[in-house]
Image: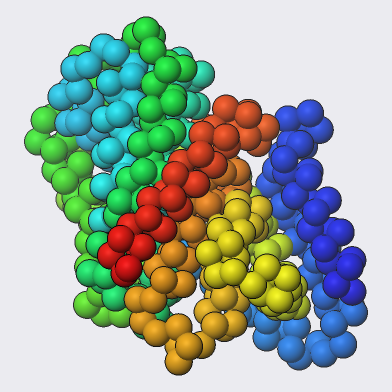
Amino acid sequence: MLTALVIIFVLAYAAIALEHPLKVNKSASALIGAGLLWTVYAMLGGDPHLVSENLKESVAATAQIVFFLMGAMTIVEVVDAHNGFFVITSRIKTTKLTSLLWLVGFVSFFLSSILDNLTTTIVMISLMRKLLDRHDDRLFFAGIIVIAANAGGAWTPIGDVTTTMLWIGGQITTLAIMKGVFLPSLACLIVPLTLLTFVLRGKAVVSPKVSENGSDIETTPFEQNLMFGMGIGTLVAVPIFKGITHLPPFMGILFGLGILWLVGELLHRNKEDDLKDHLTLTAALKRIDMSCIVFFIGILLAVATLEHTHILTALAGWLDKTVGRQDVIVTLIGLASAVVDNVPLVAASMGMYDMATYPTDSFLWEFMAYCAGTGGSILIIGSAAGVAAMGLEKIHFFWYARKIGGLAALGYFAGIFVYILQYKLLHG
């Protein structure tokens, strides 16, 4: 059974990677892969009750991410419909593409540490559509946004789901992870940014041709500012809501979405139907990219079978016996997170290494937070941020692997070098 599951997963993964030459949408490949994997697991797993319980658990975990993604994408669409991003785009005056690249990279890096890498990617890619007309330019920027969002998310407890897992599990503490992983994460961003600057040097920013306030739909400055403030405020409030209530982030984003919906209804209640139709949250829900969401469902459910059948745990155990060295093992786990979801990989590692041997804030856990958080940038489907970017900007797997993957890998290893050097200097 395990061999069959691995073969199906590899074939599904290959079909997703070869989406462009096969001319088969990656969402279809992901759903077929997930369906086949769960069917094989159900037929050959031996315990229908256990399989059913595992599926319920996986659906619950997947639904949380999907609800969050839908909420964040809808909020961004509502802000966009009101020309809210004009608040930012009107203030960016640079005409050099490389200057904009550095600005976007650092904004994504720090925004991700406050929000999370997925939300930051959605917001920043939506913003790039307002600033850049050429799709080729936007692809490079999307690549840097993914690298920056993953790097920025790794050094705070709320920026990346794997760091959050380690934080909740007691493996890391807030101040220690911020001090320990900030410089490696910064190196992980600066190396690709520097190299990409040489690729894009001399190119000018070509802005989309739009009307004076950003779109053909007329909105007042008050409406723009209000909906921009409400939208970004809702996204920023999610980690605060989580910290106070201990409820999962999707509940915070749905709560915020409801408030935004109410404000929008009250704001436009006296307008004619044909004028307010485009501005309502109902219209925004119709504009979100459902194929991107469906792809998320398929890929997360597919990876879940590898987790439930302990294939990932067995891989971690094999690494422990074969390699032995902690730093090399964690580096390999980070590289593996470019292929399979980093959440089950970190979950397996948390189960493998006990807190008695590896106490809170030890080398293993901090290094794990960095590697698992940033290693996923090497391939486009290695992180939630990458998958979202792939759907939003229609990025092809092999384009990303050729143009961005190598830069992300250099940044990843630069951060590893900085972390190990920093650890040796501080801990003798």
Q: In this figure, which colouring scheme has been used for the structure? A: rainbow
Q: From this viewpoint, is residue 361 visible?
A: yes
Q: Nearer the viewer, residue 175 or 51?
A: 175
Q: Name the quarter where the C terminus is drawn.
A: bottom left
Q: Position of residue 152 (x, y in %)?
A: 34, 50
In the displayed structure image, the side of residue 368 where residue 43 appears, left or right: right
Name the quadrant of the N terminus.
bottom right
Q: Which residue lies at the image location 41% right of the left edge and 58% below the top edge?
A: 420
Q: Residue at x 38, y 12 (%)?
A: 201
Q: Position of residue 367 (x, y in %)?
A: 44, 64
Q: Nearer the viewer, residue 5 or 349?
A: 349
Q: Is 415 positioned to the left or the right of 403 in the image? A: left
Q: Residue at x 60, y 76 (%)?
A: 348
The answer to which quarter of the image holds residue 257 is: bottom left
Foreground residue, 408 or 410?
A: 410
- Left or right: 335 in relation to 219: right
428 or 257, nearer to the observer: 428
Q: Position of residue 179 (x, y in %)?
A: 25, 62
